[in-house]
Amino acid sequence: MLEKQNLLGLPQDKLKKFFSDLGEKPFRTKQIMQWIYHQGATSFGDMHNFSKDLRQNLQAIASIDFPEVVSINHAKDGVIKWVIKLGEENHIETVYIPDKERGTLCISSQLGCALACTFCSTGVQGFNRNLKSHEIIAQVLIAQNYLKKKDKRVSNVVFMGMGEPLLNESAVYDACELLLDDWAFGLSRRKVTISSSGIVPALYRMADTTPVGLAISLHAPIDELRDVLVPINQKYPIKELMKACRYYLNAGTQERHIFFEYVMLDGVNDLPEHAKSLARLLKGISAKVNLIPFNPFPETKYQTSKEGTIDKFQNILYRSGIRTTTRRTRGDDVDAACGQLAGKVLDKSGRNVGRHQLLS
Ligand code: SAH
Ligand code: SF4
């Protein structure tokens, strides 16, 4: 038997093709999107504006399939973490972070991550596979449907969960299309952000493919240090990365800027000279720096920078005219803070064998 086509996660043009292949009119596309994304439908039986024949036909060949939610954890500060099962040995995590004016959902794009940044719990655990677009979009729908009952909503989506989104481009771009589409989530382009460790060729494609926001996980202003913290830097060094960033900023028709993320590691990348070289690197670029106090996880060798050090670092950037904010740590009592997402991943990269070497 042919596998049923999961309609969840298909962007409008692919759904249109699906219906046209069935000999159906294009307006079915918007109807089904309303059912899935606005009404929260999970089966075709209730779709009363479809003929009985069409409903039966859809039941036979298609599905609206969600993965299983294993647990929902509530942190004291309002953060909610979903653990979602994708097959026997694999779990991903999705985190909701409410604040005064926003409700940000942090979603995963891969099962684990192959890039092995030394300060990141996801990177340390290895890599299994890319998520499908329906597995990315399911995270948003699961959260949205749950939050609706509590009179809350997802206002922003960031690809800052597990995985490197620019190593899973087509599923991530399809998901972005749905996040922006009024017939699905209808978020404005400024409310969706892809965070990347800097996959240079993909950055050029992203700049021309989707209008969503970009965050770059920089973490060090010089190659020598970045090569160690973010090993993909050995392949795509800072100079190449900044060239791609400039391309992104000038592409598209609307004004763009980039968030540069910088995790504060005690005595490693938090010295005044690092702040000064960071300021030089970002001079003249439409950039905002986000300092992230390092969130520890069991196997790590790093420590969080002292509060005074972070303030000093931030002041140097300020004085150089660089907009800088320090991210508050949220949800750490349920291991939901940045870099603590580890789900459960059956590593296929073979790297876990060397896990202890990596951390020592
Ligand atoms: N792979 C992408 C997106 C996921 S990581 C990327 O690297 O950008 C999301 C953010 O969390 C990145 O900026 C990442 O560097 C940061 N991060 C990872 N581990 C962290 C930790 N232990 N403490 C604080 N931030 C961390
Ligand atoms: Fe992967 Fe991002 Fe973690 Fe690096 S920081 S290992 S790119 S998830």
Image: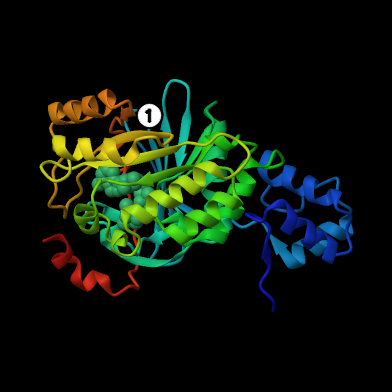
Relative image position of residue 163 (x, y in whole percent): 40, 56
Q: Mark 1 — residue?
A: 78
- Quadrant where the C terminus sits is bottom left
Give the mark count: 1
Question: Measured along the vertical axis of the image, is residue 353 above or below residue 245?
Answer: below
Task: Look at 41% across and 55% down and name the residue there.
Answer: 92
Quarter of the image for residue 172 reads bottom right
Q: Would you call the spot at circle 1 few (<14 residues within 10 Å), some (14-19), or many (20 or more)?
A: few
As drawn, is 147 to the left or to the right of 326?
A: right
Task: State the residue in front, 261 or 60.
Answer: 261
Relative image position of residue 343 (x, y in whole percent): 35, 55
Task: Look at 20% across and 31% down and name the residue there.
Answer: 313
Viewer can see residue 46: no
Relative image position of residue 206 (x, y in whole percent): 54, 53
Seen as rendered, the residue at the extreme bottom is 1
Relative image position of residue 187 (x, y in whole percent): 60, 36
Task: State the residue in front, 102 or 6.
Answer: 102
Task: State the residue in front, 127 or 81.
Answer: 127
The amino acid marked with disc number 1 is: Gly
Quarter of the image for residue 72 reads top left
As drawn, is 301 to the left or to the right of 327?
A: left
Task: Look at 57% across and 32% down and name the residue there.
Answer: 148
